[in-house]
Image (cartoon, rainbow, N blue to C red):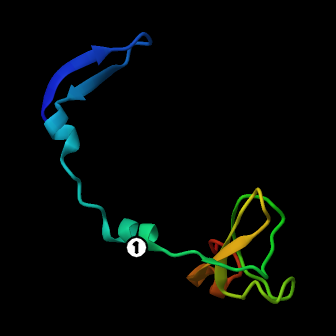
Amino acid sequence: MKVISTVALAFGAVIAMASAADVAAPVPAAPEAVARAAAVCTPSPGCVCNKVQGQFCGNQAINQACTNGHVFECNGQTGQTCDYGIRTSCVQCGKLSCP
């Protein structure tokens, strides 16, 4: 990044300003970031949630439509979910991350 000037902020920090050409230059994404961005969350109408926004591992003992080993996203406004598919930690320990 080519720095063309700096700006001192009120609380003492200094930030660098780059030219428009430098800022507009694309930065290649890491392969794992591309995979996460490309993840498709398929609507799962039978697997309802408690309206707490976030992800959770499916548990068929609680709801048959929330498939064991899959990670779901809960919509905090509607209580509807979508399914991202199988997640290793959900298969191994039933949680978003295993100890």
Q: Position of residue 29 (x, y in %)?
A: 29, 61
Task: Write the residue at 72% across / 62% down.
Answer: 75
Element type where label 1 sits in the image: helix
Q: Residue at x 80, y 88 (%)?
A: 60
Q: Quadrant of the C terminus?
A: bottom right
Q: Quadrant of the N terminus?
A: top left
Closer-to-camera residue (94/40): 40
Tell me where residue 12 appears, x and y as whole percent. 39, 13
Task: Point out residue 48 in the picture as x, y percentages from the top left corner.
Answer: 81, 74
Q: Is residue 78 left or right of residue 33?
A: right
**Quadrant housing residue 37:** bottom left
Locate residue 67 relative to residue 4 in the image: left or right: right
Q: What's the residue at 25%, 26% (across, down)?
A: 16
Which picture quadrant has residue 2?
top left
Q: Residues within 10 Å of mark 1 (few under 14, many from 20)?
A: few
Residue at the extreme right of the image, as rendered: 62
On the question of residue 1 being in view, the answer is: no
Q: Classify 83 as above or below 77.
A: below
Residue 33 location (% of width, % of height) = 39, 65
The answer to whether residue 31 is visible is yes
Q: Amino acid at mark 1?
A: Ala
| Residue identifier under label 1 | 35
